[in-house]
Amino acid sequence: MDRRSLVKHVGMAGVLAAGVAPAVRSQEVLRWRLVTSFPKVLDAISGGAEKFAQSLRFMSGGQIEVSVHSAGELMPAFGVMEGVQNGSVEMALTAPYYFTDKDYCFALGCAVPFGLTARQMDAWMEWGGGRKLMDDFYAQYNIKSLSAGNTGTQMGGWYRKEIRTVQDLHGLRMRAGGGLLGDALQKLGVQAVNMPIADAQQALEKNRLDAVEFVGPYDDQKLGFGKIAPYYYYPGWWEGGAELAYFINAKAFVALTPELRAMVEAAAALAAKDLTAKYLAYNPAALKKLLSERVQLRAFPRELMDAGFKAVMATMAEHEGRSAQFKKIHRSMRGFQHDQLLWDRFSEFRYASYMSAVRL
């Protein structure tokens, strides 16, 4: 069986497991540039881009070479979407909700407050109609999307002072994802600032911010927020699971042969799975390390969670009234979430609750 037949019969994952690089048509090497919205120090995310590039090089027998460029190397962190849109670069790894200044629908492809968990987001995207809905939206920006992995349920961020009541949020200057979360936080009295994470540490250190939220222990430890703001809150109710995305220039994607398009999709799937697993594997140890450094771990009060939920639902209703497309995608997501929560009552929630209460 030749290599092309091997790909057809066992699939790309089987080819990789067998250690056999598939042959492709001999032609000029394609050189793509992949820009990210993140600094290199965040190796879980940056590593996802590198994993994608390496896997695609292997799968294509070197026919596609992808160079990876961190935020600021070729363009600013929040400039990558436009870079892909106008063809300055072929693709980006980013968090779609960074671009809600263009349209609030971008957030629906990443994370919304009190939204889907990582596994629920994956299921909605691939089997609940989410990918088609989002790609119909992204087509307006000349973008094809693929999952780049999910960071999982996040922490609630770092604060200079304790947050005991909703009133403690009033006047707080907080680095937080813009768009939907920013609108909801404003209803709670927070001044939400959407800035690249690479700028947030300095802003916190120089008292331009009172609080910062990002992902979770593994990344937060690297960024050193606990040395400036000692109170570490949970859960990050604004991100049940942040779905990172590969944005690919639609014309560049369509120009590929069917074989190469399949390889791009397979490489993205491998890198996405790796990134999600890495966060799940690394966060527990990082949290233990932070606690050993006397970080003060706190749970958000139920009163605050309830106030946040109310503010979020009001924000969602406002945006549904302004955009039929937002309403269509959001209703699809919430309908899927409703059924997932029903199933969780009898499956993962019950199981996880029990396992959290026993001694291993």
Image (cartoon, helix red, strand yellow):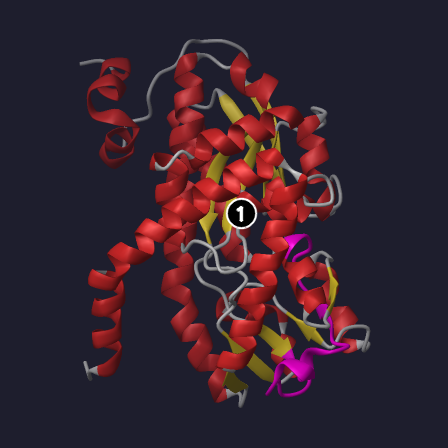
Q: Compare residues 5 and 182 and report the one nearer the observer.
A: 182
Q: Is residue 142 visible?
A: no
Q: Indicate yes or no whether the magenta region holds residue 280.
A: no
The region drawn magenta spans: 159-180
Q: Indicate yes or no whether the magenta region holds residue 166.
A: yes
Does residue 222 appear to the left or right of 200 in the view shown?
A: left
Q: Position of residue 192 (x, y in %)?
A: 73, 64
Q: Position of residue 109 (x, y in %)?
A: 53, 42
Q: Residue at x 74, y 39 (%)?
A: 74
Q: Compare residues 314 and 16 and report the one nearer the observer.
A: 314
Decide: is 104 above or below 161. Answer: above
> Mark 1 belongs to which amino acid?
Cys
Q: Compare residues 150 and 281 and report the one nearer the observer.
A: 150
Secondary structure under badge 1? loop
Does residue 249 appear to the left or right of 302 in the view shown?
A: right
Give the labeled residue for mark 1: 110
Q: Position of residue 78 (x, y in %)?
A: 72, 46
Q: Quadrant of the N terminus?
A: top left
Decide: is 285 above or below 278. Answer: below
Q: Compare residues 275 and 319 and report the one nearer the observer.
A: 319
Determine which quarter of the picture holds residue 163. bottom right
Neighbour tally class for label 1: few under 14, some 14-19, many 20 plus, Cα within 10 Å: many
Q: Residue at x 46, y 74 (%)?
A: 286
Q: Position of residue 24 (x, y in %)?
A: 39, 14
Q: Residue at x 73, y 58 (%)?
A: 194
